[in-house]
Image (cartoon, grey):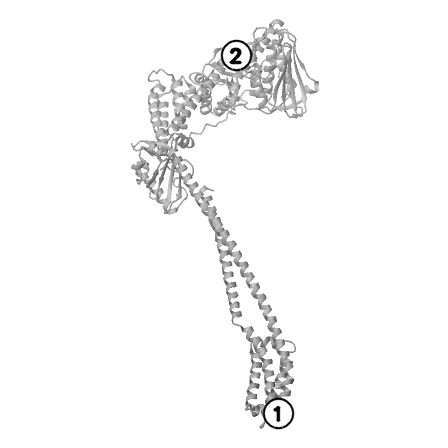
Amino acid sequence: MSVREGIGHGLARHLNIRSGLGIAAAIVLTAVLSLGWMLGRQIRDLESAGIDNTQWTLAQLELETAIFARDVIAAGQGGALGQGRDVAALKLRFDILLSRLGLVRSGEIGRPLLEHPGVPALLAQIDAYADRVDALFAAPDVGSEELQRIFEETIGVQPVMRELSLNGLDILAEDAESYRHRVRRQAELTALAGGLLLILLGALLRLIDVQRRRVVERDRVLSRTAERLNSVIGNSLDAIVVADRQGRIIDFNPAAEEMFGWRKSEILSRKVRDTLVPVERREIFEERIRTFAATGREYLIGAGRVELVARRRNGELFPIEAVMTHVEGPEAPVFIGYLRDITDLKASQARLIAARDTAERADRAKSRFLSVMSHEMRTPLNGIMGVLDLLNTTALSPDQRRQVGVALASAEILLQLVNESLDITRIETGEERIETVAFAPGPMLQRLISVLRPLAAEKDLPLDLDADETDLGAWFEGDPNRVAQVVTNLIGNAIKFTERGGITVSLRLAETGIEITVRDTGIGIAEADLERVFAEFVTRARPEGRQGRSDGLGLAISRRLARMMSGDITVSSVPGEGSTFRLSLPLPQIAPQLEAPEPIPEPATPGSALSVLVIEDNAVNRMVLRGMLQQLGHIVSEASNGAKGLERLRAEHFDLVLMDFEMPVMGGIEAAQAIRDSFPADRRPPVIGLTAHGTAEARAAGVNAGMSEVYAKPLRLPVIRRILDGIGTRGEMRGAIPDCPPDPMPVGALVDSDDFEEVVEMLGAERIGAALDGFEREWHEARPVLAGLIEAENDVVAVAHKLRGGAAMLALAGPVQSLGRIERRAPQRCTTAEVEALNAQVEAALAMARDWLAAWEPDGADA
């Protein structure tokens, strides 16, 4: 909730409290006025003396009875009549008496008096008395006797009159007491209500005072907040532009003045579209304003931060990052834009992209260097190991055979070092994969020790295996090649850094896998260096100043491989006494598997000899392969490149083709594709690919080109024997090469739309348009170089690589693939027809990219 909303809610709450108190005070005031009115009416009733008149009437009733009796006595004694007091006067007095009685009956006390116990009987006696007296007065001649009887009747009714009067007075007294109680209670209620009213009025006055002080305080806070807000807006690094519903600018902070070049006094009341929006975007901006006015949608240009293009006063266009929002104004919505100039950010991004591309090119160069070095080093190794394998099949003296074993073991270690230089790159890029196959660690260790024992024997070091018979026969699931690589590294290091004593390799089965230990009696490792030995290219000086221990890449790769197999390598050591490396691998144990025995080499009989074509550009490798194949009794022919190999295949029939990948004129991949596409199924010989790149990608490329299988160099004699055993007699595998030419590239794949949109959003349409123009110029300059029409400082590899990098940055997928093929087969130049075909592809890709660029509009289109 905002500060403004919080203040509004607080004011509303206090206003509700004050309204409630006001209503309560009004109710209490109404009650007080009502009670006062009732109390006043009662006082007025008291002032009317109605009770006093009733008491006087009751008293007069008894008095009138006594007076009437007196007058009757007087009249009966004769004096009264003689003095002119006649019967008419007595009858008038009697009528007065009855009228008093009538007042009692009909007055305020009449009903309570009639309800009083005993009063009805008294009234009945009085009525009977009145009837008798009326009858006596009705006589034609009222004499002494009648008067005597009236007197007696009157004297007899006087006690009844007194009793009636007393009862009436009692009733009046009770009513007066009750009335006084009511008046007192009403007065008390009136006083209580008045007091409550005073309390409520006091509370209301107090609340009003508190509210007044709060309003004053809030006004002060709001004033300070407004001052701070104005200060923040005025000192904001971001431009803040405020516009009304018609798009007229109503506020413009100093940062906006600096960004756009307009002074606030100059731009106020001008329209945003005419001052800050690029000309080509003005109609879109106006349409968005109208749509907002019509629909009242929440955002004008989209939610969150949006990258747009704005216009300075001098007409310069520049990229901005904008957040647009709106608030309700006094009459209509007000738009607020928070704008940031990201020209420097875009330049930094471009520099980062360039640095990334440089790093990627360097990484690719490193990988290519390693690949080339691996190929170049494998070529002589292939010759060395092949000659040694052939030499080992001849009649040698024990000393010569030992020397051949040492040379082969050294070549094996050298080959492993070459492999490790590639392994470290594949591990870093995540390309290395761990296989899961069935293998027996015991026999694997026995083979490794038999291979490496000649190296240990050269230093008079015993190399022994310590394992139980039951452990030697156990089988597990894992990657035997990687396990062998790790153990070979550990044993090689032990031989390298041990001068006396011996080396022991132990195999122990753990509950969850295997544990292989390599223990030596060498120079040892200081405690501070126990973990450092697993870093790349670590050298530790020996205390006596002689050459220290350098572990190169072996231990670093070994630990990484062990951890890729969910295991680890640990080390313990005592300087001067030796070291112990322990490889722990959590491998699942399985039932023992049947292992086929290694076939014994036998010369081929005349009927089983195969005709083999060796296509290899290196003469030493051809010689070695020829010697191995002839040793096994087969007929060998040679070709120095793929083109010559195709000529031999067209002219002669062969049972098997051994073909190198990388050769001049035509490489092995192109030759395999030509064999697959141009030879009928019954004349296609099995093709075995030979490559220095022992990767899954190389194998996939060979198989996709039509090769039956791919093997890494150097090709050893046992491997050749297995290949030939798989071929069998002539014609056994013909037609087995897969007939699956690659699908042509679809037109839509000329440009990778997702990558293209991403790079356009990152760099902007203008920069990408300029980059496309620059790439087109570079391509036209490079066409004659690729075709060999002109000599250039850079060779075909450099030119194709440069073009391929530019095409990759622009997401031109089709040219990237085509240029990659040219780069891989360099230094061979392209034919004119190939260059023209590539030119058509480049032009189509550029046209498609420009069409997409013209139709491209970023999300939340700019203003």
Using the image, tell me which numbered label, if any, was put on residue 146.
Answer: 1
- N-terminal of the pair, mark 2 or mark 1, is 1
Q: Give percent across and percent down for residue 207.
A: 49, 49
Using the image, tell me which numbered label, if any, was put on residue 208.
Answer: none
**Please, what is the three-letter code of the amino acid marked with disc 1?**
Glu
Residue 655 in sight from this viewpoint: no
Q: Quadrant of the C terminus?
A: top left
Q: Nearer the viewer, residue 73 or 139?
A: 73
- Contact? badges 2 and 1 (CB < 8 Å): no
Which of pointers 2 and 1 indicates the residue nearer the eye? 1
Please rate how many residues cluster around mark 2, counting C-alpha atoms within 10 Å: few if below 14, some from 14 to 19, many from 20.
Answer: many
Task: Answer with left or right where residue 460 lies relative to residue 848.
Answer: right
Task: Answer with left or right where residue 188 lies relative to residue 861.
Answer: right
Q: Height in image: 187 above or below 94?
A: above
Q: Give percent across and percent down for residue 705.
A: 47, 24
Please rate how many residues cluster around mark 1, counting C-alpha atoms within 10 Å: few if below 14, some from 14 to 19, many from 20.
Answer: some
Q: Give percent across and percent down for residue 236.
A: 39, 33
Q: Which residue is mark 2?
A: 381
Assign a secondary structure to mark 1. Answer: helix
**Please, what is the three-letter code of the amino acid marked with disc 2?**
Leu
Q: Give percent across and percent down for residue 149.
A: 63, 90
Q: Residue at x 48, y 27 (%)?
A: 739
Residue 273 in sight from this viewpoint: yes
